[in-house]
Amino acid sequence: MLSRFISLLFLGCTAQSLTLLRGGTFITYSESTSNLEIITDGAMLFNDTIIAISNSTDGLDSHANDESVQTVNTTGKIISPGFIDTHRHTWQTAMRTLGPNVQLENYFWMFGSGGPAPLILSPDDIHIATLMGTLEALNAGVTTSLDFAHMTWTRAHAQAGLQGVIDSGARVWWCYNVGPVVISGDPYTVNRSAPVDQLAHIRELAPNSPFNNGLVTLGIAADPPTVEIIETAQNSSVNLITAHDVGGGKKRSDAFKDGDNVITEVNNLTPGNPTLNSSMAFVFAHASSLNPSEARLLRKFNQFVSITPESEMHYGHGHPSSYLIQDQASLGVDTHFTFSLDIIGQMRIWLQSTRLGLYQETLDKFEIPSNTPMSVRQAFLMGTRNGGLALKRPDLGVLREGAKADVLVFSTDAIGLIGWSDPVAAIVLHSNVADIEDIYGDGNAGKLVVDWEGQGFADQLRASAVKFREAFAKTNISAFEEGIKLQGSLTDEDFQDPFEVDVTRGDGTGF
């Protein structure tokens, strides 16, 4: 593939120089209280790590005259930790708007890795999609991501996806998917021996991880993880494994496997549970049918769920019990080609979804709720600190001394933020991506500036999107549908049509 390196202009300083943010309201975190602490008219000094935070504007002025320090006036602004997305399939960027009404039943054979994409998309397509998707997230204040890269169909595709996140300059756990690969659509044919070479490739890549000065870390994705996969991770010093855990009425995972869900399966792989009771992080996406015993396992071994609120509503697998495990949960986006990518939206959706679900218990008793079951601060922690904990990196997603300097500066001049007083509520309930004025990733400073058109990146993504749409339109999707059903255990009996709404008067429904 062609190696491309982006001219990302983080304006103002490098990670080795010092930055002093002077003035403004800082959303910091206190380890002693395990909660957010708001500092009004404060100051913060950092390079790639936060060195000091003061509760007064002039508290760090002794550094202001140092030639190595760049002082930035942040008076009147809100300073927040960067957001963390713990579940995303970034390679699908070129599919944007193709699945506005797709649901779980047909996602697998239309847009997932078991669909026609492996037969259509080249390594160059994967590179530009991953690059642009990661930059889109970074521009939305997502300074750390977990990329579930289930496009590792060949070594060239895998290398292209990895290079895409490296070229972005973002902090990413890039999780190499291990699983069967589609090699023909009609007849539907799958190479089930692909994991042998995928694991070999992981072992070759692992000695060079982390990449890009520590910003990109190799992880493993698998549905479900096996003993061999976990042993490969341990022997290769790969410290994170992620898996889907999507249950339906019959408690089935994304791997179409009957029986217990993935959390229990992983726990049962090694007697005595030394695997889970280690420094390795396990992140389980969705856990839509979580039960009490699985919640106990997560807490016992300090492993995390990634709740993807918009995705779980969009696709229909829901999150009926996820509100009960939020102490071991973070937030993710999932398939950003179908809906928004920013974590601000996920915090907002999750907050109101949780409130509605718990209010309903009271409303069903013909009573009116007398308090709120979830606060904006809790939603904010889900999109920041809890993401760092899921990755076993407590130095991410927080503003405190010693934490990594992943920092957002929100302008409060927009009409929707004028008159604010609570900075957390301002971000979670009133802000949007355009309000992010500056982004500091690992101490690199300034609002992300990329000449999409001038460097040709936009044209490359447009061309890739057109290529996929045209090839997809000519594809016999029914062959993929039947093939996937035959490969697994799902049948038409596993699905049921929900009630369809009508939004128009007279004939038709507006659907």
Image: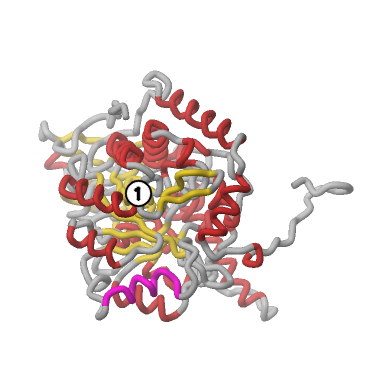
Residue at figure coordinates x 25%, y 65% from the top left: 31
Q: Nearer the viewer, residue 210 or 473?
A: 473
**Residue furthest out toward the front:** 187
Quadrant in the picture for the N terminus? top left
What's the colour scheme?
secondary structure
Count all numbered tags in the image, as a single digit.
1
Direction from residue 300 to residue 109 in the image, left or right: right
Does residue 262 belong to the magenta stretch?
A: yes
Which residue in the protein does label 1 denote? 145
Q: Is residue 222 among what the camera can see?
A: yes
Direction from residue 359 to residue 295 in the image, left or right: left
Magenta stretch, residue numbers: 260-270
Does residue 101 belong to the magenta stretch?
A: no
Residue at figure coordinates x 24%, y 51% from the top left: 200
Please say if 168 is above or below 82: above
Residue at figure coordinates x 60%, y 48% from the top left: 479
Direction from residue 39 to residue 361 in the image, left or right: right
User: Residue 403's x, y, as percent?
Assistant: 21, 53
Q: Amino acid at mark 1?
A: Ser
Element carrying mark 1: strand
User: Residue 222's x, y, as percent?
Assistant: 37, 58
**Residue furthest out toward the right:** 506
